[in-house]
Image (cartoon, rainbow, N blue to C red):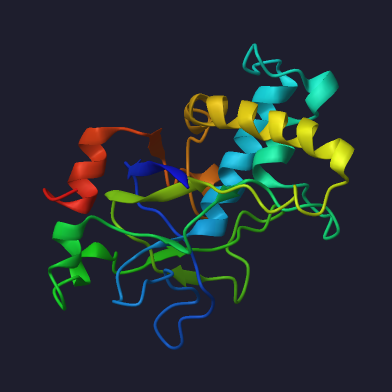
């Protein structure tokens, strides 16, 4: 399976909530199995899919890809959204995007990776005063690097296709294999923020695909 590394460098506090936070917070950051801040793979998949969809709508499709004949490149790579009967997409995303390996080696000393809580309240339009019982205290993560691998893993559609369709399907998959990295690199530049409250300035980021320096920074010197 072909694969490429995705790095996400956040420059502001970011929120990727996983539900209620008990007594201290109304929502807390999603954590990996070791307790560190992390991003769900399906969240990154959704951000890249939307960016890819925009690129296609603007006509920024690789020259060798013929949408009229082959269909939407975004749907081929990510699957058809909202249709459970449609074939799955070609791309395989990790369950979790992790923080750098040197950070993970801190063990229990990861408390500084979280903010002490960010409070917000809803303001009444008519009075300009805070609405009763609208105070929310949310946990956030500090700026830093996250990363993970995306794989090019075509589903077994050829085995299910009629014999006369297999050749065309194989040609389309082969063409997608040639261009998927370049296409995703363009799409990644359209992802400007991750997590929740992105319209409020949280989660500002630079997403890069296939950058060796950030891959080494995240996975360690042995990458």
Q: Position of residue 169 (x, y in %)?
A: 76, 36
Which of the two residues, 164 or 209, is positioned nearer the viewer here?
164
Q: Position of residue 171 (x, y in %)?
A: 70, 28
Residue sitting at the far bottom: 23
**Residue drawn at (61%, 58%), measured in percent from left and top?**
123
In this rendering, is residue 96 above or below 61? Answer: below
Which of the two residues, 110 or 151, is positioned nearer the viewer here?
151
Which of the two residues, 81 or 108, is positioned nearer the viewer here?
81
Q: Position of residue 181 (x, y in %)?
A: 49, 30
Q: Position of residue 133 (x, y in %)?
A: 60, 77
Which image quarter: residue 12? top left
- Please give the count of numbered marks on the rendered protein: 0
In this rendering, is residue 77 above or below 88? Answer: above
In this rendering, is residue 96 above or below 125? Answer: below
Q: Is residue 55 visible?
A: yes
Which image quarter: residue 168? top right
């Amino acid at each position: 399976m072909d694969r490429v590394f995705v790095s996400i460098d956040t420059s502001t506090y970011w929120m990727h909530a996983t539900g209620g936070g008990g007594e201290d917070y109304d929502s807390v950051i999603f954590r990996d199995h070791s307790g560190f801040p992390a991003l769900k793979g399906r969240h990154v998949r959704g951000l890249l899919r939307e960016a890819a969809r925009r690129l296609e709508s603007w006509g920024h499709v690789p020259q060798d890809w013929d949408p009229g004949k082959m269909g939407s490149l975004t749907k081929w790579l990510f699957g058809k959204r909202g249709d459970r009967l449609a074939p799955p997409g070609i791309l395989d995303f990790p369950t979790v995007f992790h923080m750098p390996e040197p950070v993970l080696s801190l063990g229990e000393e990861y408390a500084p990776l979280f903010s002490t809580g960010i409070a917000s309240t809803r303001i009444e339009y008519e009075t300009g005063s805070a609405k009763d019982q609208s105070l929310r205290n949310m946990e956030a993560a500090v700026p830093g690097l996250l990363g993970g691998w995306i794989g090019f893993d075509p589903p077994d559609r050829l085995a299910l296709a009629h014999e006369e369709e297999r050749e065309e399907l194989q040609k389309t998959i082969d063409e997608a294999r040639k261009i998927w990295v370049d296409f995703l690199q363009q799409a990644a530049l359209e992802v400007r923020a991750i997590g929740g409250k992105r319209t409020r300035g949280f989660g500002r980021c630079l997403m890069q695909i296939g950058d060796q320096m950030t891959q080494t920074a995240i996975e360690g010197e042995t990458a």
